[in-house]
Amino acid sequence: MSALLNVDALRVAYPGRGFRAKPHEVLHGVSLAIAEGETLGVVGESGSGKTTIGRAVLGLVKPSGGRVLFRDKDITHVTPKQRRELAKDIQVVFQDPYTSLNPSMTVGDILSEPLVVQGQSDKDARARVGMLLDQVGLPADAIERLPREFSGGQRQRVAIARALAPKPKLIVCDEPVSALDLSTQARVLDLFVDIQRQTGVAYLFVSHDLTVVRHVSHRVSVVYKGDIVETGSAEQVTSEPEHPYTQRLLLAAPIADPLEQEKRRAERHRLMERHREQDLQAGAVRA
Amino acid sequence: MSVEELIVEPAQKAAPRKSPWRKLLEDPQAVVTASLLLVIAILGILTPLLTQHGPNEASLDAINAPMGSPGYPLGGDQNGQDILTRLLHSINTSMISGLIGTSVALAIGVTFGLIGGYYGRKLQGATEWVFSLIMTFPGILLLIILMPLTKGDYRSTMLIYGVLLSPGIYRIVRNQVVGVKNELFVDAAKVSGLSDLRILARHVLFVVRGPIIIAAAFLGGSAIGLQSGLAFLGVGSNTIPSFGAMIADGFLNLYEEPTQFLWPSMLLGVITASMVLLGNALRDAFEGVRPKPVKRSVVKKQAAQTGAREATGPEVLLSVRDLAIAYRTPSGELKEVVKGVNLTLDGGHTLGLVGESGSGKTQTAFAILGVLPPEAVITRGSITLNGRELLGLSERELRDLRGRSIAYIPQEPMSNLDPSFSVGDQLIEGIRASAGMPAKEAKERVLALLKRVGIQDPQRTFNSYPHQISGGMAQRVLIAGAVASRPKLLIADEPTTALDVTVQAEILDLLRDLQAELNMAVLLVTHNFGVVADICDRIAVMQDGEIVESGKALDIFAAPDHPYTAMLLNSILDEYTVRSDAPMATHNTAGK
């Protein structure tokens, strides 16, 4: 099965701060693949480099090594013009629905702009916008309104509609529900899954939350300090992880049930103890 | 499905905010100054219709003619020219000066500001250098020196002056663009396939237009002032009627005919003052006026205290009765965000105050700490700690209480440490303020505390500055500071929300240990039911400023009474569902 997206030994370094400072490498050769219609969840903590993977795929940061292949075509270093062409196929939903929508544009303009620049007529674009709003469950009169008139969950729906506008093959979702309230989170996740079933779009789903990732992903990769330490089916990675870091991550997330959580806490303490002993034996005590 | 039915995302019903232009129309300062300028400009345009004389036409009869002479309603000047005619022509000179100066400054400043702010470091460095150079030129001197080049034409002079003004605009635009270009909507526009030009025009310039419009009003005033100044000095062509030249003429006759001096000065004054005031009004409309703080109203104590006394048992540490907090809306009425909250917290226990954003949970916690923003009004209720009423205490008494009995851990640990002092200094300051011990003793105490909160190398953290430590470490430092005085009550506002889950687990462990050790009560404000399940023995659920359900954590998790609590618990993503459907790998719509 030929993959839709292949990321091969991707390295990204940010310039160091200050005069002649060494560049700071945040990804040390990351590889992953996404098939058509598939969701790959990427889990990691802050500073792990998980967001940078998505930004590199989108062309928002320049990789310092490795390759990104979309449909077997190398898109690591494309010209701005080719990158604009790719906008038809690769889209994004960002974390913060408050800053990802231009505050001074109406929802209709936000949604139709990408279509118009791709060469659609105003009329066609408007018709498509109507369909998109319907698809993400927003009322049709949203078209004339400004982003600030909507709640966080509704704004994220607008952002999803914008990503869907050009009928892309892949959407990079960067923590798309972590800024939302609990009750909204579940419904937005359901929307992601529904849309995937309808349109066959693939997701690169980046999140810090294993539970969220488990709900939407077919496969999961775990990023730790700029490396992917574990990849596997969602089932396997989120219930019987192999890598010690994933084990820690899994047991650290509290369960919303006092009795279960007490067990998990005890289990986590045992795991930490075991890891510490292993470190001691290996002579590598954490400094 | 029941979730969908129970909660429909509330569409914000608040009236859409007024556009800045609408606000401007309602601001008397803007309306008056804009109309004044408009009337003056129209007078200038209509000059040929209003006057019988040419601007430089002189008549010997009219020399120093008094006001009201036939054909010379404002009199004549020392050269026998009609003052009214020259005034009206001067308006045009001023307006054209203002227009040229401002538009040149805007054209150059905005273009290069956008380029310099949006593109990489090298281009920014180059533009920065050039504009700094322009800024160092002494403006008026340069304009005078360049007179041979401009041949005394005020329009050429204003063109150059526009260039000299452009660094101001450049800086404003560049700073705004640097702020906006990293916003996610600009990234989203890039991903949408928009060209740089379109992004700059549609997404960046449109968002930063406010400060540019404001600056333009001030620049206009400045250009007019400068043109008059140069003309007053006699620099430039003396056939161009201008306020400056007229004032200079009038100056010579100050003692014989003071009105000759008065008219042009007054008109120039009105024009520049209107420009500046209009600029101020624009700023208010675009950037918003800060709301004036309203003094917190004093609570009706009597009713509150009797209520409190009934509820205060021996073991009750904190008791909140019928607390209501309101904010003033722009129309002046009070809008309640907390509507009669009741809470009780026994010593040594942990209460989780749970709710979604906007439920009023943080407002409630801030009210207990006595750190509500000045705009907030506590309309009724009572808060007692160990039976002592907290509402209505003086700031001094409250400070004393906060140091010793009540401690606080914030959501964002980093923003609660001062970046310019070392961690150790900040902790020592807190401890000395509340306990008043000598510096050496305080330092030992701080080191012991840092060790207690699980910091491996206390001395190193003690010497570190906040930017040198991680978020989890910063939260440990703040916890050390909070428990230093062995408080009876610790209020933690989303203490782990900004942290990674692995760090969150460690911080919760630490809080649990400290609580047992110090026997302190903890009020934990959070939206995360996992955190509540981990550490709280009691829960209070808040919705829209009211507590809808409270009780033992075990009971509520097992069988919630209120439908809202049930809905919240239901919408938690459970631990065991894994996505099971296979990807639609062979999706056969012939896309390409």
Image (cartoon, coloured by chain):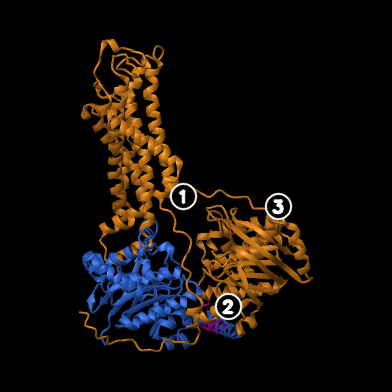
Chain colours: A blue, B orange
Q: Which chain is home to disc 3?
A: B
Per the picture, the main secondary structure of the magenta-coloured stretch is helix
Residue that numbered label 3 is attached to: B394
In the drawing, does residue B406 fall left or right of residue A127? right
Q: In terms of depth relative to the viewer, which is nearer, A115 or B586? A: A115
Please, what is the three-letter code of the amino acid marked with disc 3? Ser
Q: CA distance from mark 3 to mark 2?
A: 37 Å
In the drawing, does residue A279 fall left or right of residue A142? right
Question: Measuring 36% from the left and 16% from the top, which residue is drawn there?
Answer: B67
Q: Which chain is home to disc 2?
A: B
In the drawing, does residue B148 fall left or right of residue A135? left
Q: Which residues are magenta?
A: A272-287
Q: Earlier in the sequence, mark 1 or mark 2?
A: 1
Please, what is the three-letter code of the amino acid marked with disc 2? Thr
Residue A48 to residue B190: above or below: below
Q: Which chain is home to disc 1?
A: B
Residue B163, magenta (yes or no): no
Asked if marks 3 and 2 touch (Cβ < 8 Å), the reply is no
Q: CA distance from mark 1 to mark 2?
A: 39 Å
In the drawing, does residue B369 fall left or right of residue B588? right
Horizontal and vertical percent for residue B197? Answer: 25, 57
Residue B99 to residue B411: above or below: above
Q: Are marks 1 and 3 on the same chain?
A: yes
Q: Earlier in the sequence, mark 1 or mark 3?
A: 1
Q: Secondary structure at mark 1?
A: loop
Q: Quadrant of residue B219?
A: top left
Residue that numbered label 1 is attached to: B288
Residue that numbered label 2 is attached to: B565
Horizontal and vertical percent for residue B136? Answer: 34, 37
